[in-house]
Image: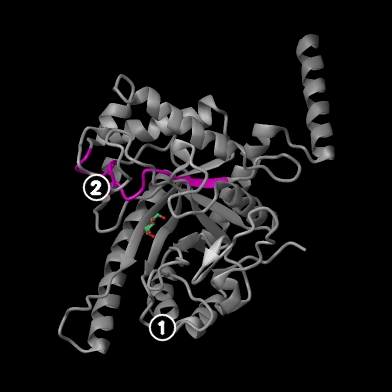
Amino acid sequence: MNPTIKTALTLSCLLIAMSSLTGCSGGKDGGKAAADEMKATLSGFSREGKVAYAHQDDLVYGHTWKVTDIVNDPLDRSDVKSVCGDFPYIVGFDLGGIELGDSNNLDGVPFDLMRRAAVTQTERGGMVTFSWHPRNPYTGGDAWDISSDKVVESILEGGEKHAEFMEWLRRAGDFLESLTDAKGNPIPVIFRPWHENVGSWFWWGGKLCTADQYKNLFHLTVEYLRDERGLQNIVWAYSPNSGISYEEYMERYPGNEYVDVVGTDHYEYVDTNAEISQEQRYASANGYYQMVLRSELDNLKRISQENGKIMVLSETGMEGIPYGEWWTGVLLPVLREYPVAYVLTWRNAHDRAEHFYAPFPGSGDSEDFKAFHDDPATVFLQEKK
Ligand code: BMA
């Protein structure tokens, strides 16, 4: 061995040994180790037939309450915990609004509070995931503004909004980079941008850009945050909407270099207008939900096996949960059939009484949720003491 190389190697070994002794794993490299550990934990859940439970915005508000003291609130309130005794294993947050430098996200959550909640959740031994509903960079509208099919084209390299969009990405990067624990190490995060992209309700949707443009947008995002900014703490998730075929899923798949987790967003809707009994209404809604979910999870299982990726149910739920046995009667039986690493149900809005997807004290599904929690297959946060 060349002596110069040997000295360099000895020195770097010494540095690695020192950093592990001090517990400082070295900024962005530490982020990579933490992201790898996160992926290993999620893969383990899949392998062992376990499914972690995730809830959007869980620590920052719930049905009829919200955190107001951004700095001092202990963040120990949770609708889910109030019902079953444990926090969700994963908490989801949304970055919508970060792109313009807003202080609150699109649902009014202060980014400073979100940062503290994400770090707290991680330090307690759980995980966090981020979605992003950014505004429309071409029209100035919101994420749901689909009035133009030029948006994605305009923000890609060479497009008239490219420079502005790179600023948006920079602001998202600044926030993600600021997610560090008490020792200053980056916390691992699952980032799930450009979701529900086969349907056409967001400006990055199926009819609003070509498959190549979509993939270029995903690539641009990963290449900027991971490669240029060096944010190795990000685990990347791709999660189209449900009701699509294997081919449709793969047509816009960004590629194995850009994705760690494959997911699907699938909701249950109850047709309240149909002139049938309530029992028949739930039977048909539940049956349809399960049928489509099975078809999505069949595709995801194949995709995750073919590409070596972790599979998840990245968003699901039934608004208002009017069916009291939804958790163990509808969702869990399907989850048991597939290696789904986690399932996320959407937010319990504090300001819209009907908009909730998880139980809260007194909600009609509370008893059933407790049974879901107690089932050996589900994973909730067992706090590190
Ligand atoms: C939607 C609803 C909206 C919210 C958006 C982003 O599904 O919950 O109220 O603004 O998600 O969180």
**Residue occupied by mark 2:** 248
Q: Position of residue 288 (x, y in %)?
A: 25, 72
Disc 1 Cβ-to-ligand 1 distance below 8 Å = no
Is residue 297 depicted above or below 250 in this figure?
Answer: below
Q: What residue occupies the far left of the structure in this picture?
A: 275
As drawn, the label of residue 325 is 1
The dominant secondary structure in magenta is loop
- Which-is-in-front pick, marks 1 and 2? 1
- Which class describes the residues within 10 Å of circle 2: few (<14), some (14-19), or many (20+)? some
Q: How many marks?
A: 2
Determine whether label 1 and label 2 are within 8 Å by CB.
Answer: no
Question: Distance of mark 1 from mark 2, alpha carbons?
Answer: 32 Å
Q: Position of residue 191 (x, y in %)?
A: 48, 45
Specify the amino acid type for callout 2.
Glu
The N terminus is located in which quarter? top right
Q: What residue occupies the far front of the structure in this picture?
A: 68
- Which class describes the residues within 10 Å of circle 1: few (<14), some (14-19), or many (20+)? some
Q: Which residues are magenta?
A: 189-208
Q: Is residue 51 visible?
A: no
